[in-house]
Image (cartoon, helix red, strand yellow):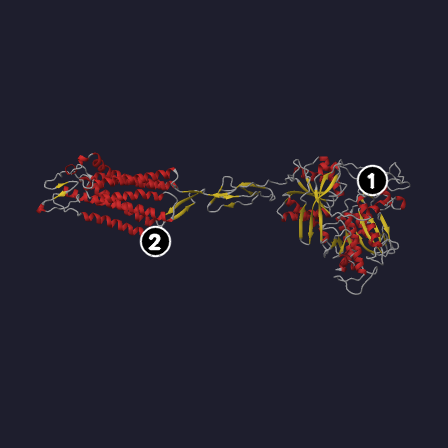
Amino acid sequence: MASIKKCLALGIFAFLWTKLGAQEKSEGSCKLLRKFNLTGLVEAKNHSMVIGGLFPIHSRTIPTNDSDEEQVSAKCEGFNFRGFRWMKTMIHTLKEINERKDILPNHTLGYQIFDTCFSISKAMESALVFLTGQEENRPNFRNSTGKYLAGVIGSGGSSLTVAASRILGLYYLPQVGYTSSCSILSDKFQFTSFVRTVASDKIQSEAMVNLIKHFGWVWVGAIAADDDYGKYGVKAFKEKMESANLCIAFSETIPKVYSNEKMQKAVNAIRSSTAKVIVLYASDLDLSPFVLEMVHHNITGRTWIASEAWITSALIARPEYFPYFGGSIGFAIPRADIPGLKEFLYDIHPSKDPNDVLTIEFWQTAFNCTWPNSSVPYNIDHRINMTGKEDRLNSMSDKLCTGEEKLEDLENTYLDVSQLRITNNVKQAVYVMAYALDRLDRCEYVKGPFKGDCLHIPDFEPQMLVPYLKNAAFPTHDGNKIELDDSGDVKIGHYDILNWQLDDKGEITFVNVGKYTFESSNFELILKKNSTIFWNTESSRSPLSVCTHVCPPGTRKGIRHGEPICCFDCIPCADGYVSEKPGQRECDQCGEDYWSNAQKSKCVLKEVEFLAYEEALGFTLVILSIIGALVVLAVTVVYVIYRHTPLVNANDRVLSFLIQMSLVITMLSSMLFIGKPYNWSCMARQVTLALGFTLCLSSILGKTISLFFAYRISVSKTRFTSMHPLFRKVIVLISVLAQVGICVAYLVLEPPWVYKNMESQNIKIIFECNEGSIEFLCIIFGVDVFLALLCFLTTFVARQLPDNYYEGKCITFGMLVFFIVWISFVPAYLSTKGKFKVAVEIFAILASSYGLLGCVFAPKCFIILLRPKRNTEETVGGRVPTVDRSIQLTSASVSSELNNTTVSTVLDD
């Protein structure tokens, strides 16, 4: 592996030398034709070794002009007070370590710091100088200071660190990042010697998604810088969003070099999208042109989720930008106070070191003046503005610096120690390097590829320090703890959650509204209960950022093909299905006894339907059945009272009483069909009805057979023997016993039961009786039909039996009514459902019972009660027009005095 990396290193150096114009001389040595134009600070004398530093002290490079006489690399412009403070923090920390006796007691650390100008090219130039110096063509790890280089702190942004680490890592030169959070830097195959004191963007992306879930946002836009930090950050964010079933509305990039076309594409995406929440993954320097675009196009009403790179940036957090970026909420590196740093920052003056060009430029830029006898330019801006023209300000100021300017009068980022976040990371990065050197010098055992004798400072190879950097763990000055894992990433820590708000002075303040803690794979989002978050919305409430509003209860999500899952149609639930909660993907089916309400939002008990006693129809039928039974009982009372009269005695009085009893049974059996069905009522009602009709029809059959024999005697020239009264009772008994046997078999083998009919009507449960075996039921009522047919045929034949009152005609009409009712009942029964089907059957029972009652007994009761004079033997009787007049047939008796013997006739008891 080492040999492969050496070959790669030689290839890179060869490429860089070619690009930078290296010329090969005849002696075989190489020399750079163009010098690296690097600025920085160095202090290496009287120190055991040096630590390199890479900081973005300027914000950009000036475009090069190849016609320049002096062949040097690009210059830098745009003094960055924030980066300058980071650099001074590193120097302050090294001085603090050198003064301590518990860390490297026998050694002191110097520094060599370069300005990366927030550009990849300068970061790579600085990395090469760290390895080779300006003239060397192979690494010697002693660079231009002549001191041994232990490692490098930096390089600032993730893209700069990636570029520098690819070169430094080839030779395992240790590098500690303080603000490079790009997730790719956790890959130890590519970045073997890199560790950092800032959490990986994977953790920050997880934190952002948890924040989005907490506020219920599902439709979020993403804007990223066109570099490693932005691209890898948004990539991790998208993966976390997808795993959480949340959606990215759009994803655009901010160009590193201003491009109106690319910038307008991002602006148009924000303006046209319904997403009101947008994640911004960019550094403050890259974000500045984008902020101006938002102001220029007056895009407001958006809530920005900030990454740690710009949430506390004074470059962006300006009052004039608050209408556009106010209410931004994001994650920041934990804040800390650094003792002695403020005093050290104030201890700066150009007169202390006339060769310190960075301090001179700081002074010129801070006080807007020109230092006497200095050629250091200030306030230069060669950027292309939004109109496409170049802004070039004067390189020198007409106002001269006096040196009496007071730093206390300044209000800039350099002197602001209220938000020391990345600044504190710089301090911890230096301490990581110092503790690793101390452990190596003490020859502490660590797991690693190097074994053998102890090596002390400065007699060690750079790669020997890497195992000490990984798994570093030490307490910090503020009581916290730095702990790194095997990948060199922060293992334990937290983010502060900040919200941009305006204070009473009209300045933007970063209000801490919560924190996001992480430890290994455990994460927790904690928002302060007593904190108020400012939302930059019309309602001053949390924004609603959705592609489609949440489907209300009663509907479900319908997928839109080709669109994200957050964009959907709300489809009403089908009947019998409900969605009780908003945003359900599927509607839930109601239980067997339940049905959906009108809104499809809740399952309600189905309406239970049966013919109840309380409702008008049921009550009416009950009244009719009771009245019918009472009428039959009244007829019975009349018959009992007048039981010795000829009309009552006519044609077997006992059968008449049996018919009356059976009519009471059929009348009252209809009440078994009313009310909620039970198993016992289902078994009783059809059987009771069948037995009642069997008793009634068999009794009528006994009467009609007597009439049939009487008629045969009356029309025959010969004498017929009359039927004995006992035979009529035997017919009734046999019919009833046969029906009882069939009914018992029916109830034992396949009895009816209560059935919940849910097929007829979805919204109702119809309680009805399942009759069990249809075959048994047909046999049972087939017996009644058979008896009815016999009754009708016999009485129809004997209908012309001469009598003043002839019972046969009445029975004939009664049977006709019986057949008409039950024949019309069949289609009516089959065409109705629910309780009305039961009502139809009850109506048929009552109608047929009332028909028989009226036809058979009404005429007799009329004569008995209203025409008693007709209730005599002479009136009831009649003469038979036969040849033999000695035979007298009446409705009361047929007498024969042959041989002085009385023979009971078919009409007499």
Mark 2, residue position: 749
Looking at the image, is 42 positioned above or below residue 301?
Answer: below
Q: Is residue 205 left or right of residue 843?
A: right
Label 2 or label 1, whichever comes before in sequence order: 1
Q: Secondary structure at mark 1?
A: loop
Say whether residue 14 is visible.
Answer: no
Residue 694 - label: none
Mark 1, residue position: 410
Q: Amino acid at mark 1?
A: Leu
Pointer 2: residues within 10 angstroms few (<14), some, or many (20+)?
few
Q: CA distance from mark 2 to mark 1?
A: 106 Å
Query: The C terminus lies in which quarter of the figure?
Result: top left
Where in the figure is residue 570, as x and y percent of width and height?
Answer: 56, 40
Residue lying furthest bottom: 452
Q: Amino acid at mark 2?
A: Leu
Of residues 377 and 719, which is closer to you in this image?
719
